[in-house]
Amino acid sequence: MSRLLTINTYSDTEWRFIKIPVAFFWLASIRSANINHELVPYPVGIFTFINGSFLASAHTVMVFFVCAIVLALLYIFEKWMTATTFFMFALSLVLFTLEESSGIFNRHSLYTAIFLSQAFAYYRNKPALSEERIQFPVQLIAGGYFLAAISKIRQSGFGWFTEAPLASIQMIKGYSYAYFNTGDVKQFEKGMKHANFILEHKLLAQSLLAVSLFLELFAWVSLKNKTTAFIYGLLLTAMHIGIWYFMNILIGSIFYPMIIFMVNPLYLMYAGLQRLVGLLKP
């Protein structure tokens, strides 16, 4: 367990417990990609230059998924990693851009950037590869949170947290989606309950939103070493859980890579179990 917090040193076991869930959640994102099967009505990115309609069909989406399975297996078994991670990047770029061009914005593009950074790490093939294939994605994740904070400040200034009661609208909206999707009136009632709580506890709401903005703004602190990444990952995890609880919003394509690369919960459980077994031995 103590090795977990060794400064910027990652064991092969830690890497194994990172790449397996990364491949799993990436595959899940590929499989669940929402794509219009007839046209690309809102082209963005590369599809502003080329017509991607010919790719938006049930057959091509299935081909994409089969290719993704092969790449995910190569990624897990550490085969031809420079090429594997590059093609994972290319497939992500095409498919997730196609999804956004269909009017669905799931923020899956973080996977695209992660695989590109890992392709660069494997291409460099330096002695620090065992750190770079993890640290490069951590840098991207921290940068994403920092840019999100800058965007909030530019758009709303301090009003982003001083006007916290307005968040009650978003809470009702989030739970209303669940209500209309499932027909479960309890979802709508829960949204109203949380919204009223925010309206009744204005100072608490302002404090929570200020803390979340602070965490995003100073996410670069996590880049100092593995210890800071781990601690900051726990703080960001708490922030996401709070957002999910109050607003019924959990952006998995951001949350899952963050917790995998920064906290590595599967390795924590493995290391904890190893230590427990060691303590129980006579």
Image (cartoon, grey):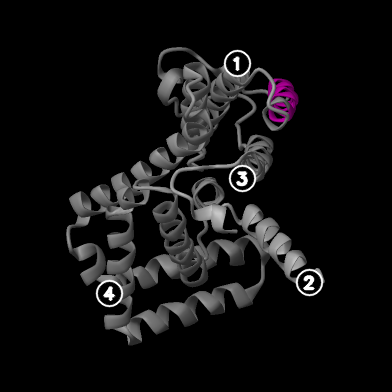
Between the C-alphas of marks 2 and 4, the distance is: 47 Å
Is the magenta region chiefly helix, strand or loop? helix
N-terminal-most mark, 2 or 4: 4
Q: Nearer the viewer, residue 263 or 175?
A: 263
Query: Callout 1: few (<14), some (14-19), or many (20+) C-alpha neighbours within 10 Å?
Result: some
In this rendering, the answer to whether 182 lies above or below 5 is below
Please tell me the numbered disc located at residue 122.
Answer: none
Circle 1: residue type: Ala
* Tag 3 and tag 1, C-beta contact below 8 Å: no
Residue shown at 71% from the left, 25% from the top: 74
What is the magenta range? 59-73
**In the rendering, at what x and y percent does residue 281 appear?**
80, 68
Residue that numbered label 3 is attached to: 14
N-terminal-most mark, 3 or 2: 3
* Tag 1 and tag 2, C-beta contact below 8 Å: no
Residue that numbered label 2 is attached to: 280
Query: Callout 4: few (<14), some (14-19), or many (20+) C-alpha neighbours within 10 Å?
Result: many
